Amino acid sequence: MLSRLFGCFILQLNRIRLFAGLPLDVVSGGTVNQFRAISAGLKALKLLGLEGVELPIWWGVVEHESMGKYNWSGYLTIAEMVRKAGLKLNVTLCFHASSQPKIPLPEWVLDIGKTKSNIFFKDRAGKPYRGCLSLAVDELAVLNGKTPMEVYQDFCESFKSAFSAFIGSTITGITMGLGPDGELRYPSHRGFAKSGTVPGAGEFQCYDKNMLHLLKQHAEACGKPKWGLGGPHNAPAYSELPTANTFFKDHGGSWESPYGDFFLSWYSSQLIAHGDRLLSLASSVFSDSAVNIFGKVPLMHSWHGTRSHPSELTAGFYNTATRKGYEEVAEMFARNSCKIILPGMDQSDKYQLKESLSSPESLLAEIGTACNKHGVGISGQNSTVGAPDGLKQIKKNMLSENLNDSFIFQRIGAQFFAPEHFPLFIEFVRKLNQPELYSGNLPTKEGTTTTTDSVHTRSNLSIHVQSA
C-alpha cells in the first residue's frame, strides 16, 4: 500500500514542468543585457533539470520608434541561447509597461496619448494610467488609423514570422498580455502597498470617455439612463479601506443592490470580453503552431474574507460570497482553448495581515475549482522571491489536483542566485524531480559530482527581479 502511494506521489511530481523567468530587462533595444551572466544562469538551470525559461518580450522594446517597425534581434539572440542550452522557452508578449525596471509603452503610442489621453484608463479623479491601453479602445481606430487589436495582431504575426525557426520546438508556450502587468484586470491598484500596511480596496477604472460611453449605452439599453452617468459614487479610493464608504459594506452595501449588480455585471463583462478578444486573436494567429497559449489571471486575495471581496470587484472580477465570478473567466479561457497562469502559489494565509482579511489559499482553490469544471489547464507562478515558507507553499500547491503540468518561478536575478535563496531552490527542485538524489549531488559534464555550492552565478546577475 505504501509503495503504491509513494509511486503515485513520484508520478505526480514528475508531471510538473519547471520554468524560471528571465529578468524583465534582459533585452534593451537589440542588445542582451549581461550576456555572460545570462548564459551561466541558463547552464545552471539546465543542470538542475528545469524544463526551460520564460522570456518577457516588450511591445515598448520591439516596436519602440514607430508603428510596424520591429526590432526582434535581442530576443532572437536569447532564443538561440536557450536552444543551445537545451532548454524550452515560454514567451510572454507584454503589451503593457513596467515601472521597475522602467520599460514604457512604445514611444509613438505615448506621443498619441499626449493629445488623446482617453486611450488610457482613467480613475475617478481623471488621472490616466499610462501602463496599458484602455480596453474600451480595443476596436477603435485610435493608433494612427488602426485599432489596438489590429496593432496587436500585426505584432503577433511579425513575432511568428521572426521566430518561425523556434516555434513548436524551442518555443512551446506563448502567453498573451491581457492588461496591467500582463494580467487580465483593470489597474485598480496603482502602485503597491508598503510592506506591513493594510492594502486599500482599489478604485474602479471606468472614467475615460470611451468607458463612460459604453456604460451610458448599457444603462440606456437597460432602461436606467441615470445609472450610466459614472461609477459608484460611494466607493472608496485606492488606499482607503473598504469600510471608508458604504459601497462595499458587508451587510446592506450598495454592491448587493440592483444598481450594484447592474454596474458590477457590466464592469466585469467588459473585462472578460477584452480577454476574449485577445485570446481569440492569439489562438487564431498561432493555430497552426505546436504551442500552448496562456493568459494570466491575478490573485486579488486582499479582503477575500469579506462578503463583497472589494479588491476583486475593483479589478473586474464579479466574485463575492454570493456569486461565483471566476466561472465566466474559466469559460472564456476554455472557449479559446487557452490555459491560465495563476500567480501567488507561494502565498499562504498565515503570513497575511489579519486586518486585510486576506486568503490567497481559498481564492486559489476557488479559481482552481472553476478551471477544473471547464477543463482549463493551470500553470502556477510565485508572486515574489523569498516569501516566508514560499517554496514549501509552492510544493503544496503543485501537488494539488488543480495544478496542470507546469510552474514558472519568477524571476532569476541577483536575489534568485543569492546564497540565502539559491541553495534552497536547488533542494526544492531536487525534492520534486530527483527524489532519489535528494541527499546526493548533481552530475557535472565530466561525469563527476558537484554540491549545491558549486553552482556559481549568484551575484553576477544583478538585473532587476520582478514579475511581468
Image (cartoon, rainbow, N blue to C red):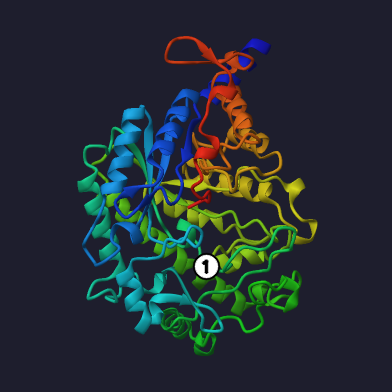
Question: Vertically, is 312 above or below 347?
Answer: below
| Residue shown at the point (37%, 50%) measured from the top left | 27
| Residue shown at the point (47%, 36%) measured from the top left | 19
Residue furthest right as drawn: 354
Give residue 398's quadrant in the image.
Answer: top right
Give residue 138's quadrant in the image.
Answer: bottom left
Q: Between 228 and 164, which is closer to the camera in this rendering?
A: 164
Q: Between 156 and 224, which is closer to the camera in this rendering?
A: 156
Question: Vertically, is 131 above or below 93?
Answer: below
Residue furthest bottom as drawn: 226
Q: Count up the numbered dots.
A: 1
Q: Position of residue 209 (x, y in %)?
A: 42, 84
Q: Between 11 and 116, which is closer to the camera in this rendering?
A: 116
Q: Position of residue 412 (x, y in %)?
A: 51, 41
Q: Position of residue 104 (x, y in %)?
A: 41, 65
| Whether residue 184 can be seen here | no
**Residue at image mark 1:** 187
70 relative to 404 in the view: left or right: left
Q: Amino acid at mark 1?
A: Pro
| Whether residue 133 can be seen here | yes
Q: Residues within 10 Å of mark 1 (few under 14, many from 20)?
A: many
447 relative to 251 in the view: left or right: left
Give residue 386's quadrant in the image.
Answer: top right
| Residue shown at the point (68%, 12%) measured from the top left | 2
Q: Quadrant of the N terminus?
A: top right
Q: Position of residue 174 (x, y in %)?
A: 36, 45
- Quick one: SS at disc 1? loop
64 relative to 272 in the view: left or right: left
Question: Vertically, is 235 above or below 437?
Answer: below
Q: Between 343 and 263, which is closer to the camera in this rendering?
A: 343
